[in-house]
Image (tube, helix red, strand yellow):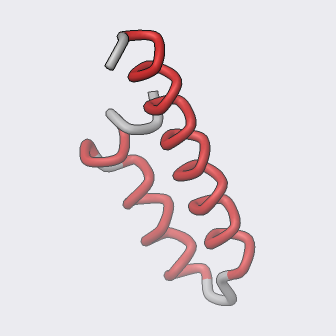
């Protein structure tokens, strides 16, 4: 797989992840769950995906 294709797939995955987290934060009804989702989004596991 070329580096261009690989880069494109990574950007698409990051975009999907950002949209899913944003939707989950918007849907949550409690501030505690919102904080948990934001903590998850800022964790090192997702930080690499979202770059």
Residue at the farthest top position: 3
Task: Spot the residue most to the front.
Answer: 1
Q: Residue at x 35, y 46 (%)?
A: 46
Q: Is residue 31 left or right of residue 26?
A: left
Where 30 sits versus 45, above or below? below
Q: 31 or 11: nearer the eye?
A: 11
Q: Quadrant of residue 49?
A: top left
Up-down relation of residue 28 to residue 19 (above or below): below
Residue in the image at 48% along x and 67% along y: 37
3 relative to 51 in the view: left or right = left
| Residue 7 on image: x %, y % | 44, 19
Expressed as whole percent of the image width and height from the top left, the position of residue 42 reads 40, 47
Residue that protrudes farthest toward the left in the picture: 44
The answer to whether 39 is drawn above or below residue 2 in the figure is: below
| Residue drawn at 62 percent across, 72 percent down | 24
Q: Residue 31 lies in what quarter of the image?
A: bottom right
Q: Residue at x 49, y 43 (%)?
A: 13
The quadrant of the picture occupied by the C terminus is top left
Residue 47 image point, x, y percent:
36, 38
Image quarter where the N terminus lies is top left
Residue at the extreme right of the image, as rendered: 26
């Amino acid at each position: 797989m070329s580096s261009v294709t690989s880069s494109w797939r990574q950007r698409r995955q990051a975009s999907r992840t950002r949209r899913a987290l944003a939707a989950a934060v918007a849907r949550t009804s409690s501030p505690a769950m919102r904080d948990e989702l934001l903590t998850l989004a800022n964790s090192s596991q997702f930080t690499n995906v979202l770059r």
